[in-house]
Amino acid sequence: MNARAKRSITETIVIAAVIVVGFCRIVAHDWINFDDTIHVTENPSFFPMSWQGLAGLWVRPYCKLYVPASYMLFAAECAASRWLHGDGPMAVPRPGLFHAVSLAIHVAASLLVLRILRRFTTHPWAAVVGGLVFALHPLQVESVAWIAEQRGLLAAVFSLLAIDQFLEWTERDQGRSRLRASYVLATGALVVALLAKPSAVVTPLLAFALASHGRKIPWPALVRALAPWAVLAVAAAVCTRFVQPADLTRAHVPLLARPLIAGDAIAFYAGKLLVPVNLCVVYGRTPQATLTDPYAPVAAGLVAIACAGAAFWPHVYGWRLPLALFVIPLLPVLGFTDFAYQNNSTVADRYMYLAMLGPALAVAIAIDRLRRADAARVGWGLPLAVGLAGAVFYLPLTWRQTGLWRDSLTLFTRAIESGHESSAALNNLGVALTDSDRPGDALPHLLRAVELDASDVDAQINLGIALTDLGRPNDALPHLLRAIELDPADADVWFNLGNTYAAEGAYATACKAFERSLELDGKRHKSWNNLGLARLFQGDTAGAEGAWRRSIDIRPHFSDAQLNLAKLLLSRGELAVAADHVQTVLERDRTHADAYNLLGVIHTEAGRPLDAERCFEAAVELEPQREDFRTNLDRARKAARPAGPPSP
């Protein structure tokens, strides 16, 4: 093995080891209630998984997103998780494997960045230090730790692969066949990147900026080579605008104000790049917040001066490429055009993932120039010293930031405590508390979310849910009706409105709300289940049975519908069929205490007291605080062991 190969292996080990040390604990983290549910844990295409369902993700958007390559990755991870843990086809996948895949993608992206940096430096360790900046900077944590943002990771790694292979193509000292292979691979990687996330539309610009630096090929040849890429990028942009229309954005900004929004965003990212503290999942820096900030014009003005200096001042010409690589990936999300996430914030850590290529190159070039300026005294010691200093500075910050992503409650509590109060952060904290059976604690956060943004449909819905859970359906109704005014085509709003009417005892009105929810989305298994309950309370047992069977057809292992149908069948004396439905629930979830209790009741009715006793014991073991379980267990034990004859 030659020295170059050994050095390459060493560099790879260093990059991978640092990433593992900085990010490893995310493997033990949970799902986050911020898009993880939408894209993975409640994605109907994965429950159960079928070729037909997966094909549907290629021919139509899902949740107003067209990212089929990312969904194929999610599907593969779901299948692998179920296989590794021996779970059934309807089981919710475990998050650990997803986090491990995110780590692997980040390692691959960092190594591709290292390959790109080597082309612009003479000292190998200068490129390594630049690669470490990309790999370890705390701004990268959101992209790596957030499972739903695997879309961005996947798009970034294929964009980097496309750029790397395009640069390989520009180095014309290879054979013709290898050149053709490099270009084909680069173009294929670009297609995958665009299908993973539309943000990859910036890839042709990045490739042009890097390839034109030093111009190893003539301008006409470079333009001709990138023309197909430009066509692909434009097609992706048009598709995105069609799938994610501008009316999704509540934060419309006048055209003349958009440069101010963009300048402020660049200044924000530059600040977090230099001082990566107080990072947050939702900064709440909406266009409205920026336009009312007296410091925003100052920040935007400084950015304009810096950009003008880079363009016209000869002494900084050498830094134009790193600056371009920093700004180009941010172009789609700077606010020049509307995008949906501006409802929450114009800026987000994840938007910096690919943009970190610019700072990484700047650091690598700076170290390389210092070494060349005084090679005798600097040697390899300077890159090593700078790399160690950066690791000492970044590693604790990155380690701390990864800890904030362990669960929804921690993440959004920190978002509020950091001073970045926003409707989105408050809403998601309220959801996390409600999901933890703490609707009383959730209420003030949800009220504040609605106060900050009364047009936030999700906040209105979740406030209605919390009030309903607290036994206050009358107070919940105005918020749910307001959500319907804001978005009458949202099936989830009608579903929760039906729940609130049912909590009031208005079952006929609840049925209408559930039916409207199903008109909008006929595959909502929870709407079918709750429609069945509402019909049952109206005395319509046939209608209830039909609704529950429809729910089960859509989601065969949905426990609520299975158990509700089992209870109805039990009341009709169809014990064997009822037991089959309960067993279906237990096949998926061996910790479902209510299922064991119901199965025990079925065994009791069937005259099998010993079987009933075992089921009630399992229910009590899982939930010892339930008095009804204990009562059923005592009765079963008495029936299984009748008292003997009295002593003489």
Image: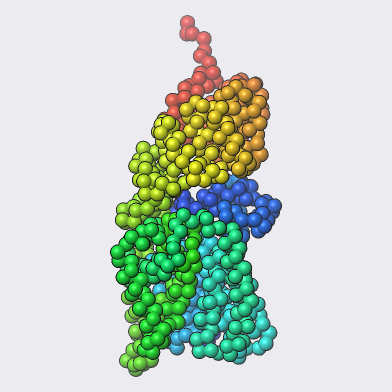
Residue occupying the point 62% across, 78% down: 227
The total of numbered circles placed on residues is: 0
Residue 431, percent from left and from top: 43, 45
Is residue 58 shown above or below 642?
below
Drawn side of residue 151 relative to residue 463, left or right:
right
The colour scheme of the drawn protein is rainbow
Quarter of the image that includes the N terminus: bottom right
| Quadrant in the rendering for residue 479 | top left
Residue occupying the point 36% across, 46% down: 451
Residue 634, percent from left and from top: 48, 21
Nearest the eye: 584 or 9: 584
Drawn side of residue 373 relative to residue 483, left or right:
left
Drawn side of residue 419 relative to residue 64, left or right:
left
Residue 482, percent from left and from top: 46, 41
Nearest the eye: 221 or 28: 221
Is residue 70 shown above or below 408?
below
Q: Is residue 62 visible?
A: yes
